[in-house]
Image (spheres, helix red, strand yellow):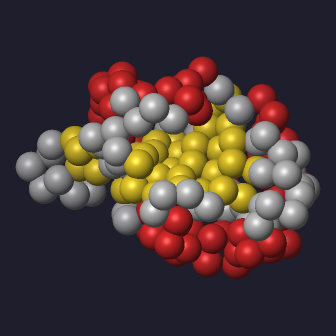
Amino acid sequence: MEITDAEARAAYDCARPEMAAAYARSGVADAARYTEWTRYATGPYESATHGGRRVVNWANATGAAYGRYEKAGVLPPGSVLAKDSFSVDAKGRVGIGPLFMMTKMDPGWNAGTMDWQYRMVMADGSVFGTTGGRGSAKMTFCADCHNAMADHDALWFLPEAYRR
């Protein structure tokens, strides 16, 4: 369903507490506190690479260089980026989507992912997969897509119109 940016912001503001509570049930510490981090999107934007869902980008303090976007360089170990998501169906109902997370690990952790660990937390609090952990094979698509941005430490950046 097509919605305006204002409608997307209103839907997000309404759903965000429920989203945060759902992700916190995962037991993943960063999933429980990502809303305390810096939010880099002025509002939810549509992400074709995340299932056409509306998403909002967040980063912890260690990953603050993310806010320099294409000039971010290589983020230090301990950087965590999170992207919460939702969709709106044809009847205007908001559905919580996954929380997509990237954690920069120590150099040499996994050359195939540029030392990023990917994790996806579902709306019911279950963890779909974690690179190097349970469900790791299901997370290969994350690394494959992000590795296309090798010149930017595997980072994709939100559209300029939505940047803080």
Q: Quadrant of residue 73?
A: bottom right
Q: Which of the image's four quarters has the N terminus?
A: bottom left
**Residue at 87%, 63% in the rendered image:** 108
Residue 78 picture location, percent across and down = 78, 40
Residue in the picture at 38% in, 65% down: 51
Asked if 45 appears above or below 148 in the picture, the reply is: above
Which of 131/72 is in front?
A: 131
Where is residue 103 drawn, in percent x and y? Answer: 69, 48
Q: Is residue 105 visible?
A: yes
Query: Which residue sits at x=67%, y=29%?
Result: 38
Residue 145 visible in image: no
Q: Total of numbered circles in the picture?
A: 0
Identity of the residue drawn at 76% across and 50% down = 104
- Name the image quarter holding the C terminus: top right
Question: With 20 as the anchor, is 162 left or right in this view?
Answer: right
Estimate the x, y position of residue 106 in percent, counting from the top left. 85, 52
